[in-house]
Image (cartoon, helix red, strand yellow):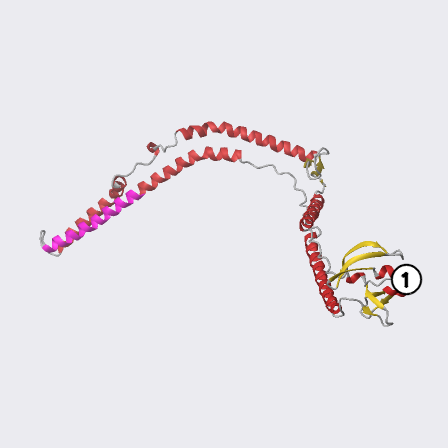
Amino acid sequence: MCSSSPSPPPAPDYAGAAEATASGNLEATRAATAANRINQYTPYGSLTYSRDPNAATPDEGWSATQTLSPEQYQILQRNQNLSTGLLGTAETGLGKVNELLSNPTIDESRLAQMPISGQSVQDAIMSRLEPQIGRQRESLSQNLANQGIPIGSEAWQNSMTDQGQRENDLLTQAALQGINTGLGARQQGIQEQAFLQDRPLNVVNALRTGSQVTSPNFTNVPQQATTTGPNYLGAAQQQGQWDQNTYNQGVGSNNAMMSGLFGLGAAGLMAPTGTFAGWSDRRLKSNIRRIGDHPLGIGIYEYDIFGQHDVGVMADEVEQIMPAAVMVQPSGYKMVNYAMLGGGNA
């Protein structure tokens, strides 16, 4: 049947290759994970890994156990007792905190009173300014009189107006200073009361968030790289491409061979000795089916050759019992001298 086109290659098993690749990757991941489970032992304690023997799969039932050394365990207990005591003290202070939270408003009776137009502070300032203002008025009146400027004259009125403006400026400055001084005192009082209210809260919070217990630090084990398993999927694709190329080459060679053979004719040819011979090479035949036995003990077959259906023997079988009856042509294909077999079929 070699004369027919070669059979196409089977399709690669992509699903099987993908499953095999996934299985390989899983095994690589398991190996890396196992390599990362390193038991550690330090002067401060140990970190060990163990697995429940009753776990369903090798990937399940793992646990990590950290054990402190006796000295570190005592430190841990003492820190915990200290934290418990601090928390108890903090709970004691909660009563004061609750009291403050139940009455969170500022006690204005304890604050500096707001000045009315700055009057209270202004009076204090003016008590020092009024003697100076009085002396300035007297000096101004004396100077005007010495200059011969009569009271009520235009020059006298202008001078007194300027003096009045200077006095008003002093009063305005005194009022503003009184307002600012009063506001500053009131703000200071608010800050002091706020501090007194916040202090219990800060104390409780400091006790609650005191120094935390720090456990010993173990070595950070480098994580093993996870390598991929064999790329079965890629291998299947490449193998499929190779098989397809081989098949295509076989088809091309077969077509070229058949094209040359068809030029020789569809019937038997005369051998160089002049005896009748037939193309009996198995490679030129297709649809081969054994239909009987030859007296020499070889098979008689029906088959298709050169586009027609025929009956005859196979050259490879004849060659085993009667080599002289088989001739090899320059093309490499074999012919059988049927005259030597006692028959005439091609």
Residue 176: x %, y % from top left: 27, 45
Q: Which is more toward the observer, 323 or 78?
A: 323
Residue at figure coordinates x 31%, y 40% from the top left: 182
Which residue is identified by label 1? 322
Q: Quadrant of the N terminus?
A: bottom right
Residue at figure coordinates x 81%, y 54% from the top left: 290
The amino acid on which the numbered mark 1 sits, given as a three-letter code, is Met
Q: Which is more toward the observer, 245 or 258?
A: 258
Residue 254: x %, y % from top left: 74, 64
What is the magenta range?
A: 154-180
Residue at figure coordinates x 64%, y 38% from the top left: 215
Task: Considering the whole magenta stretch, tell me its main secondary structure.
Answer: helix
| Total marks placed | 1
Residue at figure coordinates x 63%, y 32% from the top left: 78
Q: Is residue 29 above or below residue 109?
A: below
Q: Which is more toward the observer, 250 or 223?
A: 250
Q: In this orientation, does residue 145 appear?
A: no
Q: Quadrant of the C terminus?
A: bottom right
Q: Using residue 82 as the reference point, say whether residue 16 is left or right of it.
A: right
Q: Is residue 171 above or below residue 342?
A: above
Residue 173 magenta-highlighted: yes
Residue 179 magenta-highlighted: yes
User: In the picture, residue 84 is in which quadrant?
Assistant: top right
Q: Which is more toward the observer, 184 or 334?
A: 334
